[in-house]
Amino acid sequence: MNFIRFLKRKISQKHKFNQQFENKKWEGLRDIADLGRYSIIVGLTKYFGPNARILDLGCGEGVLLEKFADSDYAAYLGIDFSEVAIQNTAKLVNEKARFLIGDLNKLEVTGQYDVIVYNESLYYLRHPRHAVQALFKNLAPGGIFVISMVDKHGKEREGIWAELDEILEIQEKTKVTNLKGDSWTIRAYKVAG
């Protein structure tokens, strides 16, 4: 019974996101209201990983990639579980940038990345801490995780941040608030030890 409930939830969540991308619900991510958050993510990436190999998990339609100049990165891989979102990235694909459909809850990635980004996606995962730990093998020496989470009600993300603080070393933390009052916390982490 639990498996059936889980399967329905996953299918319905995927279906919901596909419909949202079809209906252009996420177009607002390109508005000026989100520019501060994206600018911090790009800035951290460029600071810690100039000409980085970037893994963008929960990439949606590739809005983050649109914020980078072509000379800012060596390689980019965006992964999202929405087929519609990934179909909408076709115009962004080039010799350095590609996109794949994948479930971040059971992700198997090959290769090494200088920057691994969870931009508003980590809190959708069943076990955020385990998902991050599973990618330690994919983080290049000296590489960083850049994680952005919306501060919707102020405290609901504290548990995830606390779990990450146990396994990662914080390098930078920034909070961005736009004119509408939307706030995000963006952190850069290295693997502890």
Image (spheres, grey):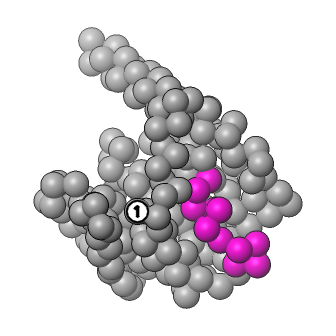
Quarter in which the N terminus is drawn: top left
Position of residue 111 relative to residue 2, above or below, is below
The reply to whether the magenta stretch includes residue 20 is no
Q: Is residue 57 above or below residue 49?
A: above
Residue furthest out toward the right: 95
Camera-side residue of 192 and 151: 151
Which residue is disc 1 drawn over?
33
The residue nearer to you, when weighing 103 against 93, is: 93
Amino acid beneath label 1? Ala
Which is more toward the observer, 37 or 127? 37
Which residue is painted at 69% across and 46% down in the image?
A: 89
User: In which quadrant will I find the C terminus?
Assistant: bottom left
**Residue 153 in the image, given as x and y percentages of width and height:** 16, 55
Magenta residue span? 62-73
Estimate the x, y position of residue 102 in percent, counting from the top left: 58, 40
Where is residue 7 shown, x and y percent of the image? 39, 20
- Residue 164 seen in this snapshot: no
Mark 1 residue crowding within 10 angstroms, few (<14) / some (14–19) / many (20+) = some
Per the image, is 64 magenta? yes
Q: Position of residue 84 (x, y in %)?
A: 61, 32
* Direction from residue 187 to residue 102 in the image, left or right: right
Q: Residue at x 53, y 36 (%)?
A: 24
For numbered disc 1, what is the local secondary structure? helix
Q: From this viewpoint, is residue 103 visible?
A: yes
Relative horizontal placement of residue 44, taking residue 178 as reference (left or right): right
Magenta stretch: dominant SS?
A: helix
Q: Is residue 38 above or below residue 153?
A: below
Residue name at image x 80 percent, y 63 percent: 96
Q: Residue 7 vs residue 166: left or right?
A: right
